[in-house]
Image (cartoon, rainbow, N blue to C red):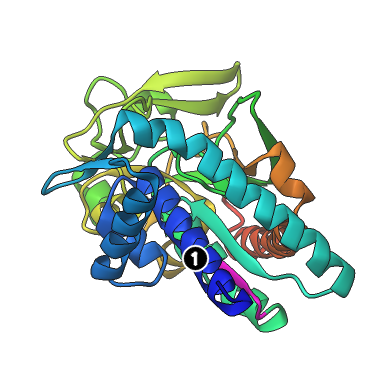
Amino acid sequence: MSDGDFKVKAMSYINNVRMFVRVFELGSMSAAARDMHVSPAVASSRIGELEKHLGIRLFNRTTRNMQPTEQGSIFYPGARKMLEAMEEAEAAVHEVTNTPRGSIFVSAPLGIGRRLIAPLIPVFHELYPEVLVRLRLSDRPVDVAIEGLDLAFVLGHLQNSDLRLKKLADCPRVLCASPTYLERRTEPSHGADLQHGRHDCLLLQFPGSSENRWALQTPNGLQSFEVAGPYTSDDGDVLVDWALDHRGIINAPLFDVMDHLLSGKLVAVCAETPPTDVQLACLFPHKRYQDPKIRLFLEFISERLKARLKDKSAHYIREKPQFP
């Protein structure tokens, strides 16, 4: 076998292993294909080639998803470690040559991702064209390890001893509703006015969430108020749309609703008991921070996010001095 043939075969094997890892992590051939920017046919072919090479079946295929076999589950940790070792070796070389290169897998909540993270990625790519940022948006909790993520932007106070957490900013939250909704119902001034069905509260809910209790600041300290309403969703933007459609009161990060507040489409309520700030942070495996491109991306995003959130809050407070 010539050197050229060996290199082609080795690269083909690496690409097949990469595809296996993404299918394993995402649980879907089509999702992995989209993530790797290839067709489902190419993705299926790569998995087939790897199975033929190993002489085992890696997945049980159904019409809806891909379930790893016992052998596939055994193969995954080693495959993942192999790819991470290659990435670390490449990163070390690129750090010496000052040319960061490779892919970064990132997740973020929908609102943050759409309004704050996504606009910054093209700017980052223009500065570092050899780094490809793969962004996935969801308001559901993510498992950084299982989903093969390098970074996960999160809202809230999380504890996970296996991950490193970098706090980025405290994001103000605001309770608000449309003027039309408030005309139909008595405008609440205190968290107690929201309880016992007195108001329709728009709730962000998914398995394991506790959004039916809102933590509000009161003269007696922080208190938790049980709220309810007919509308729930796991998408924060859907809740904003419902609030604009006069369906109820939303407890939202300021950056999600600031434009609507300034335009008068939404009005801040419960001035006596404003909600607590929510922490914006980034989760990542400890060893990933050693990768220069990960460190570079996180520092780039962190600096710009802090500045943008500060500007947004200051602008709203200046325009709306009654904000609690």
Image point 69% across, 70% down: which residue? 101
Work out whether residue 214 or residue 293 is closer to the camera in this orientation and state it. 293
- Quadrant location of residue 230? top left
Q: Residue furthest top?
A: 220
* Residue that badge 1 annotates: 115
Q: Classify 10 Å Cα crowding around label 1: few (below 14), some (14-19), many (20 and above).
A: few
Image point 79% across, 69% down: which residue? 94
Image point 22% across, 53% down: which residue? 246
Q: Looking at the figure, which quarter contains the C terminus?
A: top right
Q: Does 145 sit above or below residue 209?
A: below
Image point 64% across, 42% down: which residue? 284
Segment tinted magenta in the rendering: 129-133
Question: Helix, strand or loop at disc 1?
Answer: helix
Work out whether residue 288 or residue 19 is closer to the camera in this orientation and state it. 19
Q: Is residue 258 visible?
A: no
Q: Whole-percent x and y of residue 222?
A: 58, 20
Q: Looking at the figure, which quarter contains the N terminus?
A: bottom right
* Left or right, residue 274 beside residue 49: right
Work out whether residue 294 or residue 67 is closer to the camera in this orientation and state it. 67
Find out whether residue 74 is within the magenta segment.
no
Number of numbered discs: 1
Find out whether residue 132 is within the magenta segment.
yes
Q: Does 283 sit above or below residue 319?
A: above
Work out whether residue 318 or residue 40 is closer to the camera in this orientation and state it. 40
Q: Does 209 sit above or below residue 23?
A: above
Q: Is residue 13 visible?
A: yes
- Quadrant location of residue 2? bottom right
